[in-house]
Amino acid sequence: MVITKLNFNHVCGNTTKTNKIKAVDGNSGKEEKKGGNAVKVRHILCEKQSKILEALEKLKAGGKFNEIAATYSEDKARSGGDLGWMPRGSMVGPFQEAAFALPISSISSPIYTDPPVKSKFGYHIIMVEGKK
């Protein structure tokens, strides 16, 4: 079974799993390695919770992550929410914890944080495209 989302406690940033999850890389079928030193990450960032929840509903309805990020994210420094490779220690606590806990996924079939992760910048929906 392939998972489509992970649940995160947005108040303290701790991951909570609703059931046992075996993360699988959709491209290779190999089990996903945990941790690593860097993640290739995308996010949708909104200051207001109501706006991020609207974006989350669009994702749940099958929208592509990059298109929803371009429409909803208030951080448009990079297209489609692409933050590129981020080394461990370069992200705020709850964001980093969520990013390193997520398995690798793709824009067309994203595995993302649900509910969004809260940081000092606002609310984030995060997905990871690579780990090294």
Image (spheres, helix red, strand yellow):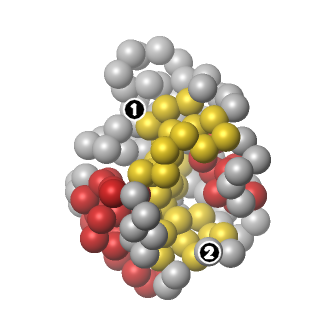
Q: Which residue is mark 1?
A: 2
Report whether residue 52 is seen.
no
Coordinates of residue 68 in the picture (x, y in percent)? 29, 63
Under circle 2, the secondary element is loop
Q: Please name whichever residue, 103 or 89, is drawn nearer the observer in this view of the structure.
A: 89
Q: Residue at x 35, y 38 (%)?
A: 106
Q: Please name whichever residue, 124 or 14, is drawn nearer the observer in this view of the structure.
A: 124
Which quadrant: the N terminus? top left
| Residue 21 figure quarter | top right
**Amino acid type, residue under disc 2 in the picture:** Phe
> For the residues marked 1 and 2, what is the alpha-carbon distance in whole angstroms?
31 Å
Coordinates of residue 36 in the picture (x, y in percent)? 68, 29
Side of 26 where 67 appears, left or right: left
Q: Which residue is mark 2?
A: 121
How crowded pointer 1 is (Cα within 10 Å; few <14, some 14-19, many 20+) is rated as few
Side of 58 where 116 appears, left or right: right
